[in-house]
Image (tube, helix red, strand yellow):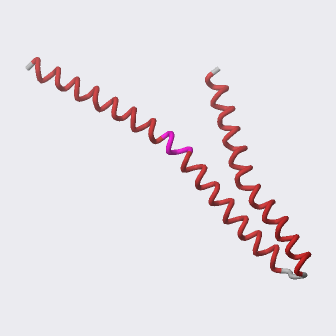
């Protein structure tokens, strides 16, 4: 059961990454096409796609940072717990001597 949860969690993470990267591209692409139609230029779409790519990578970076911060906090708590157990064990050994 726990294995199924990790697979579902990984699948949801991949889907979330795809959506956060593709949505700025689609939105900026549509705006770029609209700008090209209204102003009769060829550079509006290119400029907006570059902006969409940058926004997609920024969203990806923020999402990954948020995801890894949770894991890092959990890992730090586990390390603190292990360190306290080690200190407690060393204290008991020193008291016996």
Find residue 11 and report its horizontal and vertical position in percent: 70, 38
Looking at the image, residue 4 lies above or below residue 21 = above
Based on the picture, tell me whether residue 60 belongs to the magenta stretch: no
Q: Which residue does the image show at 54% across and 50% down from the upper left?
A: 65
Q: Which residue does the image show at 23% across and 24% down from the upper left?
A: 88
Q: Which residue does the image show at 70% across and 52% down from the upper left?
A: 20
Residue 33 sits in which quadrant?
bottom right
Find residue 21 and report its horizontal and vertical position in percent: 71, 55
Residue extending farthest to the left is: 97
> Magenta region: which residues?
67-71
Residue extending farthest to the top is: 96
Looking at this view, is 60 or 3 the one in front? Answer: 60
Question: In which quadrant of the rendered image does the N terminus lie?
Answer: top right
Q: Which residue does the image show at 61% across and 23% down from the upper left?
A: 2
Find residue 53 and report its horizontal and vertical position in percent: 71, 65
Looking at this view, is 61 or 3 the one in front? Answer: 61
Question: In which quadrant of the rendered image does the C terminus lie?
Answer: top left
Q: Is residue 45 left or right of residue 50?
A: right
């Amino acid at each position: 059961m726990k294995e199924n949860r990790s697979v579902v969690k990984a699948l949801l993470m991949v889907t979330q990454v795809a959506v956060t990267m593709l949505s700025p591209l689609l939105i900026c692409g549509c705006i770029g096409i609209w700008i090209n139609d209204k102003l009769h230029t060829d550079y509006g779409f290119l400029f907006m796609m570059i902006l969409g790519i940058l926004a997609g990578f920024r969203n990806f970076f923020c999402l990954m940072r948020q995801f890894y911060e949770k894991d890092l906090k959990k890992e730090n708590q586990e390390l603190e717990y292990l360190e306290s157990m080690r200190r407690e064990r060393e204290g008991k050994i020193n008291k016996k001597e």
